[in-house]
Amino acid sequence: MFLELIGVIFAGIAAAGAAMILNRATGGRLPRWLAPVAAGVAMIGVTVSSEYSWYARTSAPLPGALVIAEAVPETSLYRPWTYAVPYVSRFAAIDTASRQSHPARPGQVLADVYFFGRWAPVNMVPVMFDCSGGRRAMVPPGTVFSDDGSAEGLQWAVPEAGDGLLATACGGAG
């Protein structure tokens, strides 16, 4: 966040400097308000560019085992351009290398799900997916699994049809 702020400030300084150099080159014929307007436009442009490129910058270096299951596009009233082209502000990825299932419960898969947010730390949550039942449950710390692979006290939720997390976790698991 700090480096993005520095980048925005330097973009504003560079644009104002370019406007002042252009004004000097034209013999002072350009209006005096051009430098601050150029700085403001450059700063807004860099900020918008940073917002739209965050998802690509964050998801590109992820290891191959982390499969992006859902990306959440966002629109905002104070960013009217997002109604024309929404930007991704958060996404969830499943660590396919962490997928586990119990032989007694082949329709259920336990996997680590990573939640990424634009201005939020990355969170990892183990999630139990019931592929045959079309539901999922977060597995709280300290959950004890019995010998048959069942866990007591899970709060199951039935997601909407076409849920990316469920489809990714169960894609080939049963």
Image (cartoon, rainbow, N blue to C red):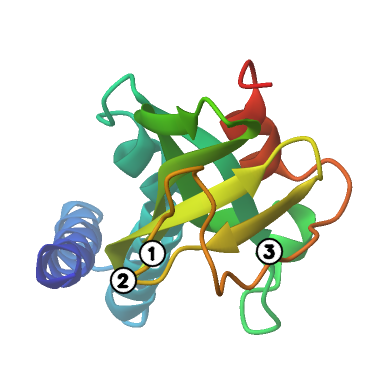
Residue 14 appears at what percent x and percent y? Answer: 15, 59
Please indicate, yes or no, whether residue 5 appears anywhere in the rendered image: yes
Identify the residue position indicated by label 1 in the image: 118
Q: Nearer the viewer, mark 3 or mark 2?
A: 2
Identify the residue position indicated by label 2 in the image: 141
Q: Quick check: 122 left or right of 166?
A: left
Number of numbered callouts drawn: 3
Relative to the observer, which residue lies in front, 92 or 105?
Answer: 105
Looking at the figure, which quarter contains the N terminus? bottom left
Residue 116 appears at what percent x and percent y? Answer: 39, 57
Q: Earlier in the sequence, mark 3 or mark 2?
A: 3
Q: Earlier in the sequence, mark 1 or mark 2?
A: 1
Please tell me which residue is depicted at 28% across the width and 73% down the height of the picture.
Answer: 35
Tell me the distance, in whole angstroms, between the alpha carbons under discs 3 and 2: 41 Å
Tell me the distance, in whole angstroms, between the alpha carbons under discs 1 and 3: 18 Å
Dot 2: what SS?
loop
Please tell me which residue is depicted at 54% across the width and 37% down the height of the picture.
Answer: 109
Tell me the distance, in whole angstroms, between the alpha carbons under discs 1 and 2: 26 Å
Q: Residue furthest right?
A: 161
Relative to the observer, which residue lies in front, 164 or 98?
Answer: 98
Q: Nearer the viewer, mark 1 or mark 2?
A: 2
Which three-letter amino acid code belongs to the residue tagged 2?
A: Pro
Q: Is 100 drawn above or below residue 7 in the view shown?
A: above
Which three-letter amino acid code belongs to the residue tagged 1?
A: Arg
Identify the residue position indicated by label 3 in the image: 81
Q: Nearer the viewer, mark 1 or mark 3?
A: 1
